[in-house]
Image (spheres, grey):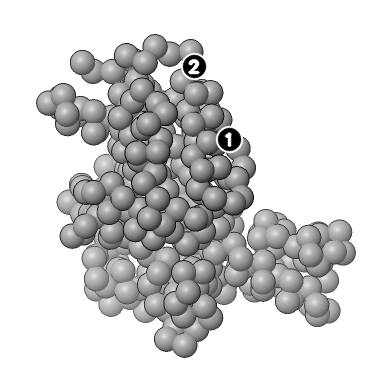
Amino acid sequence: MRTSYAVGLDVGGTRIAAGLVERKGRIVKESKTLTPKGGPFGVVDAIIDAIEEVSASVHPSEIAGIGMGLPAQIDFYRQTVEFCTNLPLAGVDMRSLVMSRVKHSVTIDNDGNTAALGESRFGAAKGAKDFVMVTLGTGVGGGVFVGGQLFRGYRGLAGEIGHMIVELDGPECPCGAPGHLEAYVARPAIIRQGRAAAETFKGAGIKRLAGDDIERISAEVVINAANTGDEEGVRIMAEIGRVLGEALVGIVSLLNPQLIVVGGGIGESCPIVVERAAAIIGEHALAGRRDVHLVTAELGNDAGVVGAAALAFDEHDSREGLQR
């Protein structure tokens, strides 16, 4: 039976978003809550609450299943969490824990993959067969499409763009290894640079936007400074774009994508990042630099939710022998 709805969840280090989603990608009902601090069971409780909230008005028979994007390395074929930097979910059987409390099948995937799937079906990458998605937020995620299909690699672990090495002896990434892209361009790195700048005369504008309280400087404060032309804010975010661009040079040379979609709260809110990254690719990429276009994601915070729902629809239709 071709069901009408699926539930999509985008579980991040900062917030959990859920939506009841139609097959054409429209979110009928949505829920957003802060991600609980502490152990995995609090996260599972919040997920269950979100599922119940968005699906309460729909009969269970109308729901294809539940798709869930997690900020973790997922062995997609075994449906297990291998490693998770920003939440205590490593080794936790998230799929079984959620399925034990709901009436539907659950499919989990990396949140970069679900965001890429959402943009592929309904957003900036619609119609593109070969593209790369990069999400910049609390962490850095990614997803890769090759020949119109999500490329998962040998065990479904592909697409970890945030853990590409950009400097051999660079600062420690939240995962514990040195010099990864995430250590340079994610929210904590922007906060660190913004607060360091605010200690100097040049960072007075950033400090002022935070009410003259350095501890209140967030990534959003720095981005706001940059978007309003503050010199030090522009410098910081242009540097974020430069480092991102240098990492993407290798991806362009390796994969020759048609498109690179930059999403996440940071990627979508600061045009300077995308503009600077595009300039770096144009200057330094070897193969494919004339082919690739760098664009901002279109779905915003909804990409992960609708992508996760699309994943649930796909899994349901595959079991039922239905064509997409």
Residue 24 place in picture, x, y as percent? 34, 26
Looking at the image, which is closer to me, 200 or 283? 200
Residue visible at 28% across and 18% down in the picture: 3
Q: Quadrant of the N terminus?
A: top left
Q: Position of residue 112 (x, y in %)?
A: 39, 52
Disc 1 marks which residue? 32
SS at mark 2? loop
Q: Is residue 292 above or below residue 323?
A: below
Q: Quadrant of residue 310?
A: top left
- Asked whether residue 132 is in view, the answer is no
Q: Which of the image's four quarters has the C terminus? A: top left
Q: Secondary structure at mark 1?
A: strand
Where residue 223 appears, as percent x and y from the top left, is: 66, 60
Q: Is residue 106 above or below residue 260?
A: above
Look at the picture and state if 195 lies above or below 40: below
Residue 303 lies, in percent from the top left, at: 44, 41
Residue at point 51%, 43% (across, down): 41
Q: In the rendered view, does 316 fall on the left or right side of 9?
A: left
Drawn side of residue 281 relative to residue 230, left or right:
left
Q: Nearer the viewer, residue 102 or 317?
A: 102
Which of pointers 2 and 1 lies earlier in the amino acid sequence?
1
Q: Say few, some or many: other residues with alpha carbon within 10 Å of mark 2 (under 14 / 14 to 19 / 20 or more).
A: few
Name the amino acid, label 2. Answer: Ala
User: For mark 2, what is the residue?
Assistant: 56
Residue 170 visible in the picture: yes
Mark 1, other Cα within 10 Å: few <14 / some 14–19 / many ≥20? some
**Residue shown at 47%/62% (left/top)?**
85
Q: Amino acid at mark 1?
A: Lys
CA separation, marks 2 and 1? 15 Å
Q: Residue at x 32, y 14 (%)?
A: 61
